[in-house]
Amino acid sequence: MDWLERAATLRQWTKGGARAPHKPLLLLYALSRFQEDADGELFYSAVEEDLKRLLAEYGPPNKTTPAYPFHHLVSDGVWEVRTAHGPGSPGSAVRDLRAAGAAGRLTPELRAAMRREPSLLGRMVRVLLDQHFPPSLHGELCEAIGLELEPAETDGLSPARRRRGRRMRELVLTAYEYQCAFCGYDGRIGTVPVGLEAAHVRWWAFGGPDDVDNRLCLCSLHHKLFDKGVLGIGDGHHILVSQHFVGRSPAAREHVIALAGRPLIGPQPGVHPVATRHRSWHTDQVFHGATRPAANLPRSRSRGGSGSRPQVSPRTPTG
């Protein structure tokens, strides 16, 4: 039985690139608990709050319930549910799972396979992370779930993985003149840029192309906040800041809240800015909550040169 293939092909509701990481998050959580107790059961009433938190932090902006994956993951052959009345889930309603004392765990076949081949767990985790989340969140998500993996455990082949363009990072950083499109940070050690990353707008895991019009040059901080849905890109290529973000320190106000409403620092003339279809996907599937009003702060970046060039509207490429 190919457990990696099963992890890669979980049955999910998908339409128009919508994110549905409910089953992957539950399976990652179950793999973590397997590390603690290989035969332990997860009672829905005991893990409901953990799963709610994971869905709120790493799921799409729309409200959802952990009862859905707890019930439906059974159909993928990696998860089983039982109640005091015997095997089988009582349904996908929260009240039914609670009232029946429903408990779930990985199937006996999968547990046996991971005992025979300990590295299987790490390889399944890698497949789930690659399929459903951007690389900037992988380490944090493992920590949040409690997964402890050795580097060798995550090596191995993931089914049908797309290959990224090796030169794309350099092309993106060059297009944005080696500065963060949100804050203008442009640090280097000698001639080598540090803390700058080529971020996908529409995630690679959800069909986002490896093209400049789906990429941004971002500093490490703003890349993480962009992938967590704290930051986004609105109409007119202005920066969105989620009202869900709370920061009282001067640093939080300066580096995050004060960005609200500011124009994105655009790419060089002649380079495609972020395409509307990718920007809209990020707003619908990643950005969390209502947007903060534009900050009542001076918008001058006082950096001079090309670093202060805002992108007010998409440019038409000239070459």
Image: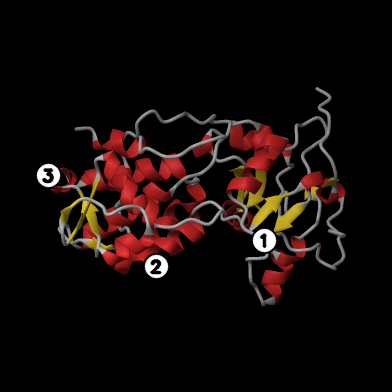
Label 3 – label 2 distance at C-alpha: 32 Å
Residue 49, label in figure: 2
Q: Of circles 1 and 2, which is in front?
A: 2
Label 1 – label 3 distance at C-alpha: 46 Å
What amino acid is labelled 2 in the image? Glu
Quadrant position of the N terminus in the picture: top left
What amino acid is labelled 3 in the image? Arg
Label 3: which secondary element: helix
Label 1: which secondary element: loop
Label 2: which secondary element: helix
Badge 3 or badge 2: first in the primary sequence = 2
14 relative position to 310: left or right: left
Quadrant position of the C terminus in the picture: top right
The location of residue 10, given as percent across then percent down, is: 35, 38
Q: Which residue is mark 1?
A: 242
Q: Is residue 157 above or below residue 303?
A: above
Give the farthest residue toward the top.
Answer: 319
Q: Residue at x 75, y 53 (%)?
A: 239
Relative depth, front residue between 167 and 311: 311
What amino acid is labelled 1 in the image? Ser
Q: Residue at x 22, y 57 (%)?
A: 34
267 relative position to 86: left or right: right
Residue 102 visible from this viewpoint: yes
Q: Of circles 3 and 2, which is in front?
A: 2
